[in-house]
Image (cartoon, rainbow, N blue to C red):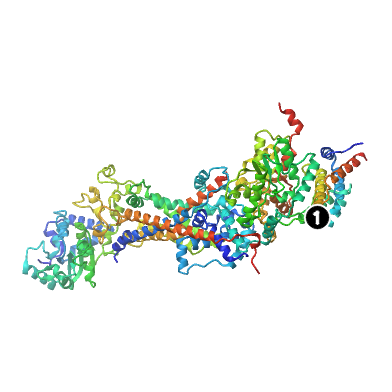
Amino acid sequence: MSNEKTLGEVLRQQGVTRRGFLKFCAATASMMALPPSMVPRIAAALEKARRPSVIWLSFQECTGCTESLTRSHSPTIEGLIFNTISLDYHHTLQAASGTHAELAREKAMQENFGNYILVVDGSIPTANPGYSTIAGISNLDMLQDTAKGAAAIVSVGTCAAYGGIPHASPDPTGAVAVTDIIKDKPIINVPGCPPIGVVITGVLSHYLTFGAIPELDALGRPLAFYGKSIHDRCYRRPFYDKGQFAETFDDEGAKLGWCLYKLGCKGPTTYNACATTKWNEGTSFPIESGHPCLGCSEPDFWDGGGFYKAISMPTGDITRTAVYAIGAGAAAGVALGAVNRARKKRAEKAHEKVTINDLEKDG
Amino acid sequence: MSASFERGINAFKEQMDAPVAAFFSSCVRCGLCAEACLFYTETGDPKFTPINKLEPMRRVWKQEYSFWGKLTGALGLSKPVTDAELTEWETLVYDSCTLCGRCSMVCPVGNDIAYMIRKMREGMAASGHAPEGLIGATQRAVTIGSPMGVKLPALQAQIRHAEKDLGFSIPVDVEGVDYMLLLSSMEIMNFPEFISAVARIFRHAGVSWTISSEAFEATNSGIQIGVSEIAAELVERIVAAAAKLKVKYVISPECGHAYMAIRWEGPNLIGRRYDFKVVHILELLDELRASGRLQTSGKETQRLTYHDPCQISRRGGVVQQPRNLMNQIAADFVEMPETGTMNWCCGAGGGVSSNERADEIRLKVFNRKKKQLDVIHPDAIVSACSNCRIHLEDGLEEYEMDIPVLSLTETIAEHLVDREQKEGQQP
Amino acid sequence: MTEITNDRELHAALNGLGAVQQRLLAAGFVKSVLHLCTDERIARVLETAADPEASDAALAEALKTARATTFDCHTRCGSEGDWLEQAGYFVARAAVAALTPLGQMPGGIAWQAAMSARMAQTSKSIVTGDNTAGLESENQYRLLAGFLNS
Amino acid sequence: MTETELLMWARGPALQVATVIFLLGVLVRILEILVLGRKASLAEARGSAVAGGLRTIVTRSIPDRGTLQRSTFNIVAGYIFHTGFFVVLFLFAPHILVFQDVLGFSWPSIPTQIIDATTIVTIIALLAVLAHRVRHRVMRFLSRFEDYLVWFVTILPLITGYFAFHRIGLTPPTLIAVHIISVELLMVVFPFTKLMHAFTLFMARYYNGAIAGYRGVNS
């Protein structure tokens, strides 16, 4: 694919009007929590941006991230923007296969060395490189090799960002995140299982607009999308504050749309844009559909003690432990009490009668 | 044999029981008990904080009776109590605690601190840390029969004197009567009017009573110094006399700790129940009043207040009776602020008055009583304990307050309706 | 010729008297047992009490001294009692009664002085062992009768 | 250790251990007291010991007027922090969920805004209590290391809880883990310190009231 044309040219070729373009820029700005004054700058930058080469590597993954991306809002401005990059390598989407496919990757790497964007989905097995290979190349080797010439890396999905489900206990493959392997490149984590399509494109837009990676949180996520917790933006939040909770999935509270905290919602500890951006063309998001947030954009969300148990809940069976402890405590208490009684009895036995002649010490 | 540190520690161990353990376990060191103790409020010295007075005993409890204490003890992390510490605590346990139990009413977790001080004194006495004055009183109580050395001839002289004044005889060693009256040495020595007053009231009310020549002393130095065996011996004398005279009741006189000793501690000291009942003189008087057998005429017009002796009201439960009696004979009976079971101690109970070393502090802390009196300005104070009376007089003198102190029983006797009149009224 | 033969008459007669008269009589009661008190202060205050012309200020001062004396010689609870000292205490107490302003002593000032004087005598008799019960009261009856008849 | 591992440790093994130490310790302490026993009084009763004991358990929560006047600050601050602590502990929805998990039953929660405000007030009251302890001559005199330790482990869950609720400083799972660990610290320290008063005060009040009630006194 050619990457000679600017984004503006491509968009016009595709019949996108100036107005539609600006609308997209405004939407992007708002999504990234940028002030409206930034819209012209985004427009100008995108207008001039050259279609960058993008190499997409899929490791231990389920293709859910790609599904999210491709099935989102089609045909939409995100779809167009997708067309505006030069996706030079992507297992699922590229036409080429086998040797040709790998050649495409190598070619893109050579031609755009130092400038291409590397997108990774899926985690990297480290227990044994043979657990996941592409064209005989281990994921680890391929990642290290491809990362060398990348301008920036975008870890799409929780697996690439934090190890995700392959990393979940007992983690047979020794799955790790991109950040565990690559230390010398700017890396943007776009976690989620899957991430929201619009967020993926939004991150790319930002990079195209500003030529730099966006501001990230401590977990490497763009603050623009991951700056607020689901809980903070959740439309059911007032129920939480008022103490109105659904106790089961079919009780009155659930029907009335009360807070799902007691059903294990991870909203309070999950940072993502679901509650505002929503899914399926802004239709809804899991909580809106009556299901608690799983916390999929957080590290180790699979090992958080169960999807239907609140994050503050004991993981084990405390009741049983308590019963044993009470039993043992009762036995120990009675035993120690008996020792004390015996001690008192001994003291009583050792008592020597105090008479009026015993009230002063000798000497 | 003599007192020894080991015997003292052993006594501490003997004294531990569930209440003590619960109390020590519960203390959060909030310091509220300090504000309930006149020895703290009037000196401002935190060492007088009631719970601090128990510190050596608390450590013995912790080290001997709690698993955590035993564990730290085994690891050499806890410091055993020393004899020097007991010496240091001697003044806190005997000189600056009257066992008044006001702290026990205030403690938010419910610690009965006075209950524990009483127990702690067992160990202090056994370890030779009792004050000289109390040792002397205890020795006299056992050998002579009175802590003040009052012998039978002295009582007999007072009785003769009273009989002459009264014009009728006072029953001594009369078998088969209902009541046996006990007296405190203080009454025999300092307030012999009490004997006449009781005699007049009982004659008026038709109470059949007697005084025992073998056990007339009500006080019990044993419970003050903290030696249960001695206390028991003194109680046994009364029990024997009561049995000999076959009385139904034994009357505890106007004395605080005597009531505690004979009414509440007595049966537990001797390890068996009595065959008779113990009543406080005020209980009996109120009963006579209620049943109409005690009739008074006229009321004191002076502004009178009633000082609750701690062992009679807060620790003894005779709270309402004196008030009924006061209302019977006083037109202007006014309560001190914080009265009844919350009354402030005069500062000399619990053996403090027998202990010369405590003279200075007991007068100093009387200031608390002064503050109470300053609020109501009574013309006279009525009380029901010779020791309270003497100390109130002492304290009032010290603070240059001109308020007479009266005995409730004696004041009632002043208001008795004439016997002839009373008989005339009866149908 | 008035005669006083018992306490009831004594009490009634005493309380029928005025302040000065009561004080003078009370001083007489104290005087007859004064030898039982070793504290010189009591003898001094007694002079004031026996002075019909004594000023209120002098009386108040004397009362203060008498009171202080009682506190110095009473027997504390639990301390070893000495009946001779105790006799002195009752003399002092009688002096206090004598000097107390009328109406501030329940039972009357002369009456209380009489009672305390008797107790002083009884205290002494406890030591000496002689049966003096009643002697002091007879003496008081005579004193009062003499006073009333003079 | 990742933050999730820390959280899982706090919710899992650490909680198990803390529960065992807490319950075992508390039970031993209580039984050590009870088994020691006390002699029944042989004196004739004037009132009911049982009624007096039960009565004092309740009435001792209300200070007498004189004490309230003399120790107003101590009592008011004490009341606020105790009440606040219990409100936050027992009426915050996530806490109730934990109790429900262990006990099998639950009760209604109160709005989080109230919990939030209560937490602040409780923290302030605890700070005031500490200042009072350091400055008041009696409390300073009586205080030992244990008193400061107990204060620390009491205020810690409130502070960590506040931080966790508002997600201040660290990532939420870490904050929650720290909060849970601070509670576990409180549980572990509990049986070895005066924190035991939360249980033994009922015994102490009962005995106090029973001793007095037997004599016909309302203590």
The answer to whether residue B325 of the structure is visible from this angle is yes
Which quarter of the image is occupied by the N terminus of chain A?
bottom left
Which quarter of the image is occupied by the C terminus of chain A?
bottom right
Residue A31 image offset from top left, x and y in percent? 25, 57
Q: Amino acid at mark 1?
A: Leu
Name the residue beneath numbered marker 1.
C84
- The reply, left or right, for residue B225 in relation to residue D180 is right
Q: Quadrant of residue B135?
A: bottom right
Residue A101 image offset from top left, x and y in percent? 8, 67
Q: Give the secondary structure at mark 1.
A: helix
Q: Nearer the viewer, residue C61 or D120?
A: C61
- The reply, left or right, for residue B267 in relation to residue A7 is right
Q: Nearer the viewer, residue D217 or B73?
A: B73
Q: Is residue B231 above or below residue A156?
A: above
> Mark 1 falls within which chain?
C
Residue at (60%, 63%) from the top-left corner?
B127
- The reply, left or right, for residue D161 in relation to residue A258 is right
Q: Is residue B268 above or below residue D179?
A: above
Residue A32 image offset from top left, x and y in percent? 26, 59
The answer to whether residue C54 of the structure is visible from this angle is no
